[in-house]
Amino acid sequence: MGAGGGTTEVTEAGKTTGYAEVLRVPYAARLLTGTLIGRLPHATGPVAVVLFTRAEGGGYSLAGALAAVYGLTTAVGQPLLGRAVDLYGQPRVQLPAAVVSALGMVLLAVAGIGVLPVAFAAVAVAGLFTPPLEGGLRALWPSVLKREDQVHRAYALDAVAQEIMFTVGPLLVTLLVAVHSEAAALVVINVLGVLGALAVVASEPSRTWRSAPREAHWLGALRSPGLLALFGSFFFVGLALGSITVAGVSYADDHGRDEIYGWLLAALSLGALVGGAGYGARQWAGPPETRLRAIVALLALGYLPLALTPGPLPMLALAALSGLFLAPALACSFVVVDRHAPRGTVTEAFSWLVTAFGVGAAAGTAVTGPVVDGAGTAWSFTVAGFGGVAALLVLTATRGVLTAPVSRAVPVPDPGGPGAAGRPGSGENDRNGAAEPGFSSGREA
C-alpha cells in the first residue's frame, strides 16, 4: 500500500505508481471530489423524488412516473449539454446547468405535487439540465495527468468513486429525511450539487480546458461506429443493473426481511469496489477493446448464478461476485471512449455513455416488474443474466468496428514524449492509435 492507502506497483521504468500518486497531482483530488459532490443530485434524484412524493401523499404510481420523467430527461440532456461543453467550454455550461437543475428541484420542494403539471415540469427541468460533470471530468484527466498510465488509473479511480457515491448518496438522503424532511433533503442535496460544480469549474484546469477542433457534423460523437457499438453494449449492462434493483426487492419480500434488499445492493457495490481497486492497481497489456470483451464476459458470467436465488448469505456472496467486474468494465470503457471519440467530441461521447447506461437501467426496471408478477423472483434475476450475455454479444458482433480507434487526422506523438497523454490544455486524447502502457504501437489488428 502506498501513502494515503493507494495500491502501488513498480513499472518497467522503475517508477512507483498508484492511486495516491494520481491524487497527489495538483487539482486531481479537487476535481474528483468536486465532481462527486456535484453529481449527488443525479445519484440521489430518483430516490429523493420518490420519498418526497410519498411524503406529500402521492401514490407509488405518481412517484414512479415523476422519477421516470427525471431519468428520461437526464438521459436526453446529458449528450446535448456535453456537446455544448465541447463547443463553449466547461464553466459556461456546467455551472449554469447545475443552477437551473437545482432550481427545478427547489421548485418541486416548494410547490409540492398539488399541481401535477408544475411537479412534472420541475423534475423535467431538473433532469434536462443535470450538468455533464461525469463526462467533463474524464475529458479533463488527460490535461491534468500528463502520463497515459496515470490517466487510465484515474479512470479506474473514477469508476470506484462512482460506486461509493451511488452507495453513500441514498444514505445521505435518508439521513436528511430523518433529521428534517423530504423537502429539505431535495434542497440540501441540490445545493451541494451546485457547490460541487462550482468547485470544478473554478479550478484552473476546467477554466483553461478547450476541446480539440471538431468537424461540423450533426451526429457529433455518434458518427463513430466504435462508439455506437460500445453504447449498444452498455445499454444492456445498464439493463442488467436496473433489473437487479427490482428483482432484489422481490427477493427481500420473499424472505420477509426488507433489510435484505439494502444488503444485496451493498454487496454488489462492495464487489465493484474490490474489482475496480484491483483493476486500477496494475497496468494492462493489449488493446482495451479486446480486454473489454473479456471483462464483459466475466461480468455476464457473474450475473447468471443470481437466478439460483439461494438463502440470504449465499445470495449476498453471489451479489458481490456479480459486481466484481462492473467497475473494471466501466474503467475500460472510458479508455475505449477516449480512443474512438471523433476530435472535438470527447465530453459528448462520455455523456452518451452515461445516457446509454441510464436508458438501459430504466428499461431493466420496466421489464423486470412484469417478470416478477408473472413468473416470480428467480425468473426476474434471469433478466440480469440476459443483459450481461446481450452486452457480450454486441461487443463480439461488432469487434470489427472496435478493432482500431477512429482517425483524428493528427500526427502520432512519441508515447514517451510530452504529448503522450493529450495536448496540454485540450483535455482530449488526440493520439491516433498511440500505444497503451504495456504494449507497443504495433498493436494487434
Image (cartoon, grey):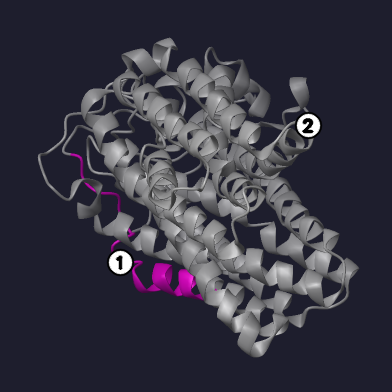
Magenta residues, as a range?
389-408
Q: Is residue 271 shown to the viewer in this render? A: yes
Q: Is residue 378 above or below residue 48?
A: below
Image location (x, y in percent) of residue 442? 35, 48
Label 1 is placed on what type of residue?
Answer: Gly
**Height in image: 234 above or below 18?**
below
Q: Are marks 1 and 2 in contact (CB under 8 Å)?
A: no
Secondary structure found at label 2? helix
Mark on residue 179? 2
Residue at 82% from the left image edge and 63% from the top image edge: 258
Residue 304 placement, left or right of 417 = right
Residue closer to the observer: 46 or 280:
46
Residue 197, image x, y percentages: 47, 23
The residue at the point 62 percent across, 89 percent down is 374
Q: Describe residue 75's horizontal placement relative to residue 317 as left or right.
A: left
Q: Residue furthest bottom?
A: 375
Secondary structure state at the residue bearing disc 1 = loop
